[in-house]
Image (spheres, helix red, strand yellow):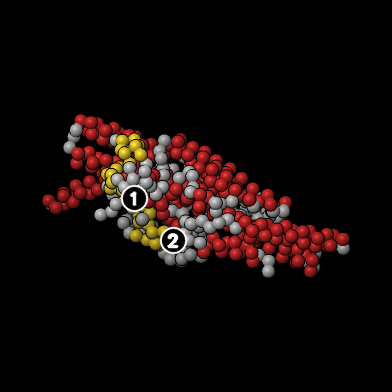
Amino acid sequence: MESGSRDGTTEDLESLIATTDAELLRRAWRNEKAAPEILRYEKHLVDRIEGQIQLMEETVDDYTETGVDPLTVSLYQMDLDRTQFLLRSYLRTRLLKIERFILHILKTDELHERLSDKEKIFARRCAGVIGKHLDDSVLLNLPENYQSALRQSTTSEEDDMVLEPRLDTFVVCKAREYISPSEFQDDSNSSLSMDLILEMEPGELSFIPYRRVQRLLESGKLEMV
Amino acid sequence: MYGRKACQLVKETATGEKGQIKPFNDDMFNQVIQECCSHHLELQSLFRNMQEEGLDIQTTRNADFYGALIHHLSLTRNKRCLMAYMYNRAEVIRSLRWKLGRVLPEEISKKLSSSEKEYLKGYSASLDAYMNDINLDLTVDMVPPKDPYIQVRVLDDIGEVVLTDCSANLARYSMHFLKRTDAEPYISQGLMEELVS
């Protein structure tokens, strides 16, 4: 009986920790780092984190001024530094993907909508700069029918020059709840392990093509490791 | 052989050390562009031949057509190689911007073509604008912090500077105990080194 109730409290504590903004940011950051494509911008989370960083900075300043125990101050400072690192790294990882797949993102509405407003501005500016650079150095020197950055030539029927993320790449992910076989995405045009019946228990690690867990990641049923 | 030069150009980026940039291969680059243009001339003259013989380009499948096709494919291949060359170099240039700051040292800067220098400037400007927008400097804090303060040795005379929590006289070879975020820009410019015990 006693041990049962103790287990209950640790579980409560764990679930409490798992839903703090710091943990949510860490999860968002890990997902963003591991996923090959750009994920939805966690607007509300980032807003909250920014508020907390400001609050923490003020607390640290206050404590330094009023001469609170230096150890306490440095612990707060450390916490602050970690949060700031996570936030910066999260935003950096996104920029890196935006830069790399810029043309693909700008011409795919669904991906473009995943950016924050400020990232959209950044993406447009970047696209302008790289576009001019490629035009000046390569494209304008080529014969007339071959000057598009999106198509190999005017005879191409679709955009066949745009760099896209490889969604078939394998990722390591962990289920956060039970996932039944029917929930995995089946992509009929890819031959990757299609007949394999899959299910995941909570906490189970899997090594799987990103494409098949894309939607599960979005709904938060699993996370990247 | 068609396409060989373009392939060498791409190999150059593939065999280079990661994150390092090689001098822009002006000579080879222009030769490939030339090759593209001559492919195009050949292609057009073959099509003219066919037209003079009164053949329909859409449906005729004779020697001239396949010749033209080869030229077309070589041209698109060259184009892909040229674009890959520029795109990969642009990626390295961006990573240099993150590592070294807005202004690259002379020995790296001279490896870039003039268009690439323009690109670096433009890219830097859009990155600065974005960081200004979000009011956060993203170029510091590149490694996960272990300790908020680190021990550093100054390698060059930096002089009196104001840091976030104090001002310090950063004389050459002096040692300091600084906030990591304050020290990082100096470390990346090679003006300081971190002392690891």
- Depth order, front residue of B182/B69: B182
Which residue, given by chain and number where applicable, does mark 2 sit on? Answer: A170
Identified by mark 1, the residue type is: Glu
Q: What chain letter is assigned to the residue under label 1?
A: B
Which residue, given by chain and number where applicable, does mark 1 sit on? Answer: B193
Q: Circle 1: is it few (<14), some (14-19), or many (20+) Cα within 10 Å? A: some
Asked if one can make out residue A27 in the rendered structure from this viewpoint, the answer is no
User: Measured from the top left, where is residue B163 in percent x and y?
Assistant: 33, 37
User: Measured from the top left, where is residue A177 in percent x and y?
Assistant: 33, 53
Q: Is residue A112 left or right of residue A150?
A: left
Residue at the image position 35 percent from the left and 39 percent from the top: B159
Residue at the image position 61 percent from the left and 64 percent from the top: B7
Secondary element type, mark 2? strand
Q: Is residue A66 left or right of residue A25?
A: left
Does residue B101 lie above or below B24 as drawn? above
- Depth order, front residue of A103/B162: B162
Residue at the image position 22 percent from the left and 46 percent from the top: A13
Q: Is residue B101 left or right of residue B172?
A: right
Asked if one can make out residue A198 in the rendered structure from this viewpoint, the answer is yes
Tell me the quadrant of the picture where the C terminus of chain B can be found. bottom left
Quadrant in which residue A173 is drawn: bottom left
Secondary element type, mark 1? strand
Mark 1 and mark 2 residues within 8 Å of each other at the beta carbon: no
Tell me the quadrant of the picture where the N terminus of chain B can be found. bottom right
Label 1 – label 2 distance at C-alpha: 38 Å
Q: What chain letter is assigned to the residue under label 2?
A: A
Residue mark closest to the camera, 1 vs 2: 1
Looking at this view, name the residue that lies furthest to the right. Answer: B53
Identified by mark 2, the residue type is: Phe
User: Measured from the top left, where is residue A54 in percent x and y?
Assistant: 32, 34
